[in-house]
Image (spheres, rainbow, N blue to C red):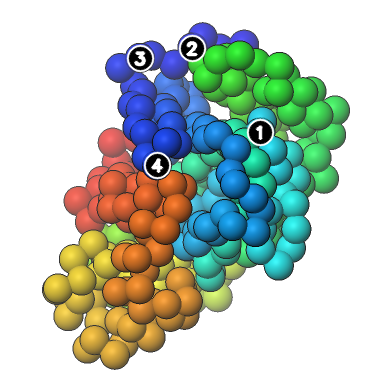
């Protein structure tokens, strides 16, 4: 079991009487994971009255561990206690059913493949019970331990230990082509032509698309569309830098998040989870989606 995360690597927040703890893990997990979040909230008035949270595509895969009452995915039902959340091409909506306790691991966009035996593209737009993807006994023991843990530091240490075990077990070599391609896509704010990118990387278009999709979980075009939209959303007044006109920007917003950019601002404030994770600091301004990101530093 690894030691507790350094205090200097963590931040806390409270929104709508819901508490959040954000931790950046230490190496070797820091090379693969952007952050670990814990959300805790009290009992909601009722399942029917609780405002759902709309979670939009961000270009990353996640793992979610519940140590409170079950979260519901609208249209699908109760979420598994331990879930792998594949890359999203459209929004999903969730609703709390009682006391909320969530621990969310957000991978860097090229890195989740190191923790699973399956190609990531097979999990696109899916929330899959982790026990069906990796060792079931390992997942079940972790779930039981999270329920018994009294402190966030203990929960984080348990999940970090679990992730290190997966990393040692599968330790898939990450494709440098996918990582390099992500750097170029982000640098161009999602506007780079995929054919030009494959030429820059010295690969045929079909080979490049296959390698990118296996390592990231999205097609290069799909990932680019998310980066492009988020770049425009970061400063909607200057969407012309990434979209031909406002109608193209609105069309992309409806396709990815189901509403216009203006309506999305209201949705961000509709629930505690939305206020925290869908505001600029968490929604698009992550280190791997900034144009100034240089992947040579890791």
Q: Which mark is residue 7?
A: 3
Element at badge 3?
helix
User: What residue did someone put label 2 on?
Assistant: 4
Say which residue label 1 marks.
Answer: 68
Viewer can see residue 221: no
Q: Residue at x 34, y 65 (%)?
A: 266
Q: Quadrant of residue 116?
A: top right
At mark 1, the secondary structure is loop
Q: Which numbered disc flags the more N-terminal residue, 2 or 4?
A: 2
For the point 27% across and 67% down, the residue is: 233
Residue at mark 3 to residue at mark 1: CA–CA distance: 24 Å
First of labels 4, 1 by sequence position: 4
- Is the residue under label 1 in contact with that under label 2 (CB below 8 Å)? no
> Closer to the observer: label 3 or label 1?
1
Q: Please, what secondary structure does the residue beneath circle 2 have?
A: loop
Q: Residue furthest front?
A: 45
Picture quadrant of residue 10? top left
Q: CA distance from mark 4 to mark 1?
A: 18 Å
Q: CA distance from mark 3 to mark 2?
A: 9 Å
Using the image as rendered, state which of residue 174 and residue 159 is in the foreground.
Answer: 159
Report the residue marked by disc 4.
16
């Amino acid at each position: 079991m690894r030691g507790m995360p350094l205090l200097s690597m963590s931040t806390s927040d409270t929104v709508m009487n819901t508490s959040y703890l954000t931790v950046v893990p230490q190496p070797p997990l820091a090379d693969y994971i952007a952050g670990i979040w814990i959300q805790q909230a009290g009992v909601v008035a009722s399942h029917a009255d609780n405002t759902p949270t709309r979670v939009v595509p961000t270009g990353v895969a996640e793992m979610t561990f519940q140590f409170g009452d079950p979260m519901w995915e609208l249209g699908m039902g109760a979420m598994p206690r331990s879930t792998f959340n594949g890359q999203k091409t459209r929004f999903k909506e969730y609703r709390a059913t009682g006391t909320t306790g969530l621990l969310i691991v957000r991978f860097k966009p090229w890195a989740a493949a190191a923790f699973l035996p399956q190609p990531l593209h097979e999990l696109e737009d899916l929330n899959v019970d982790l026990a069906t993807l990796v060792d079931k006994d390992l997942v079940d023991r972790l779930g039981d331990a999270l329920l018994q843990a009294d402190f966030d530091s203990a929960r984080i240490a348990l999940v970090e230990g679990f992730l290190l075990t997966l990393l040692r077990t599968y330790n898939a070599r990450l494709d440098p082509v996918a990582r390099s391609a992500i750097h170029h896509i982000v640098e161009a704010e999602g506007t780079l032509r995929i054919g030009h990118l494959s030429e820059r990387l010295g690969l045929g278009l079909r080979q490049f698309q296959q390698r990118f999709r296996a390592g990231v979980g999205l097609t290069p075009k799909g990932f680019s569309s998310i980066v492009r939209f988020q770049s425009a959303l970061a400063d909607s007044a200057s969407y012309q830098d990434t979209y031909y006109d406002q109608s193209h920007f609105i069309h992309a917003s409806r396709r990815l998040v189901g509403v216009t950019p203006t309506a999305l601002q209201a949705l961000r404030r509709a629930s505690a989870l939305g206020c925290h994770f869908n505001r600029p600091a968490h929604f698009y301004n992550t280190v791997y989606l900034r144009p100034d990101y240089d992947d040579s530093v890791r």
